[in-house]
């Protein structure tokens, strides 16, 4: 029996060695690798070690909510950086408070410059002799400023810039202690116009959008080369702080205000500040700075909004807004329009009833509302979607019921999954937005 036991023990060791098996990583070391990952892809690989470490779900959730430890040995002041992509080098600047304290979470402002179509190549913001400026051009509250660079072939209204902004934000959050629910996007002129594109395409990371001296309808001009179809209804998800000038030769109040009124009347939260005496500049900034920062402070992001509205084309699948992901649209949808449809101009005059942006591809839209463990969906053109369920808002001990267009499509218990928790933690890099289950729904 002793020889048999020894033989089995040796065989076990040989089998373990043969398959490369090793003792599960310790929980601490697994999380250390997860926190030190350089990007979401590396974090996804490290997440597998966390799952195999044997950590209980609740313990992993608690660690994710606490977040990574932040070093005090980081650069302060103006930090000039760049990242490489298939489009070339994307330069960007960070302005970090000199008093940066890693124990404190900081508000972040992503600030998009103007004159993007006059920049022929990618170059540092500080390389134009002051155009666009180096450092903070619109200084406000103590915060972290993110100042990326766009140019003619990579304007703010392009997919490559959406990818760039997401990658920069992810990198900043891995280095500095960021208040995830106070990340805002602001912009001037072309930067402001680009914000409307970002808000209609990638709402999840941001608390609000603050376009200054821009105009949404520039994006309807074929000459600017917008690379995606746009859905103004998506603006319902986040508040806007808008400033325009009456003497602006590009976007005067008489041109902008009908569309601001259209958005407001259709349900978008718009804090509008017309400056009748202002031209196409920010000379008014000293007077508007406090109102701007008060708006930012008073409109934190809700990572789990009760109501989400999102629309996208088949080219953009999967398309996500917070806890709603559209996976597939119907190719020949003949379903009635969902109201309100902000693409249909509601203002007076000859443009009443006209579409703001043209349509050439099938799209799908979902209006999702959550109350307790019940989710109600209204859809048009959607074939499949995924609902991301957070333990912060759902009671997993009780059934979760989902209806779509008045019909029950799911009703039962959902099991929290450590693998799902770590998957989305790796993707979002967000302590305040964590998901424990995916509920896949087919729409008949």
Image: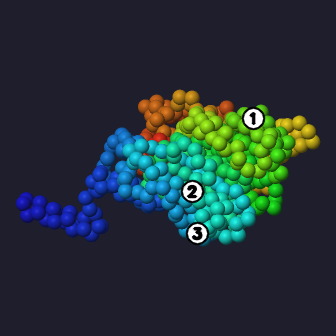
- Residue 138 tag number: none
Query: Mark 3 falls on what kind of element?
Result: strand
Q: Nearer the viewer, residue 339 or 254?
A: 254
Q: Position of residue 274 (x, y in %)?
A: 76, 39
Label 3 CA crowd tier, 10 Å (few <14, some 14–19, many 20+): some
Nearest to the observer: residue 34 or residue 279 = 279
Quarter the C terminus occupies? top right
**How packed is label 1: few (under 14 Cα within 10 Å), some, or many (20 or more)?**
some
Residue that mark 2 sits on: 135
Picture colour scheme: rainbow
Q: Nearer the viewer, residue 373 or 154?
A: 154
Quarter of the rendering containing residue 26: bottom left
Of the image marks 1 and 3, the number of the one nearer the N terminus: 3
Q: Looking at the rendered structure, which numbered label has been put on residue 264? A: 1
Viewer-nearest of labels 3 and 2? 2
Whether residue 395 is situated above or below residue 138 in the rendered picture:
above
Sequence-wise, which precedes: disc 1 or disc 2? Answer: 2
Q: Work out how far the residue at label 1 is from the one at label 3, CA to CA, in angstroms.
A: 39 Å
Disc assigned to residue 89: 3
Whichever of callouts 3 and 2 sits on the residue coming sooner in the sequence is: 3
**Does the CB distance between marks 1 and 3 fall below 8 Å?**
no
What residue sits 47% from the left and 41% below the top? 432
Using the numbered discs, state the Cα–Cα distance from disc 1 to disc 2 in whole angstroms.
Answer: 34 Å
Q: Look at the image and tell me whether residue 194 can be seen.
A: no
């Amino acid at each position: 029996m002793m020889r048999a036991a020894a033989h089995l023990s040796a065989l076990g060791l040989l089998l373990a060695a043969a398959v490369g098996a090793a003792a599960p990583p310790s929980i601490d070391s697994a999380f250390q690798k997860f926190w030190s990952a350089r990007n979401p892809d590396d974090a996804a690989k490290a997440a597998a070690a966390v799952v195999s470490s044997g950590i209980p779900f609740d313990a992993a959730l608690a660690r994710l909510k606490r977040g990574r430890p932040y070093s005090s040995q980081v650069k302060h002041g103006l930090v000039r950086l760049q990242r490489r992509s298939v489009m070339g080098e994307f330069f960007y600047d960070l302005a970090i408070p000199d008093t940066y304290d890693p124990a404190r979470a900081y508000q972040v402002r992503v600030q998009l410059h103007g004159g993007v179509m006059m920049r022929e190549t990618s170059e540092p913001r500080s390389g134009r002799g002051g155009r666009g400026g180096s450092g903070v051009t619109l200084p406000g509250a103590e915060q972290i400023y993110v100042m990326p660079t766009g140019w003619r072939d990579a304007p703010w209204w392009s997919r490559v810039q959406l990818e760039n902004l997401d990658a920069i934000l992810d990198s900043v959050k891995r280095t500095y202690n960021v208040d995830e629910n106070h990340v805002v996007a602001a912009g001037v002129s072309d930067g402001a116009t680009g914000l409307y594109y970002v808000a209609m395409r990638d709402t999840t990371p941001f608390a609000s959008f603050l376009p200054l001296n821009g105009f949404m309808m520039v994006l309807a001009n074929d000459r600017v080369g917008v690379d995606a179809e746009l859905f103004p209804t998506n603006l319902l998800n986040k508040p806007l702080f808008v400033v325009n000038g009456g003497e602006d030769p590009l976007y005067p109040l008489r041109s902008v205000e009908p569309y601001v009124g259209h958005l407001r009347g259709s349900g978008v939260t718009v804090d509008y500040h017309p400056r009748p005496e202002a031209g196409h500049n920010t000379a008014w900034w000293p007077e508007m700075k406090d109102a701007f920062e008060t708006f930012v402070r008073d409109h934190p992001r809700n990572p789990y909004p009760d109501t989400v509205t999102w629309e996208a084309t088949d080219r953009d699948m999967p398309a996500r807004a917070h806890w709603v992901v559209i996976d597939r649209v119907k190719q020949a949808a003949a379903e009635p329009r969902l109201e309100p449809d902000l693409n249909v101009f509601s203002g007076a005059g000859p443009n009443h009833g006209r579409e703001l942006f043209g349509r050439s591809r099938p799209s799908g839209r979902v209006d999702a509302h959550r109350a307790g463990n019940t989710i109600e969906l209204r859809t048009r053109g959607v074939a499949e979607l995924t609902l991301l369920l957070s333990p912060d808002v759902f009671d997993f001990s009780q059934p979760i019921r989902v209806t779509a267009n008045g019909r029950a499509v799911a009703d039962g218990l959902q099991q929290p999954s450590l693998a799902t928790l770590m998957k989305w933690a790796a993707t979002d890099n967000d302590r305040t937005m964590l998901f424990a289950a995916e509920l896949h729904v087919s729409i008949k």
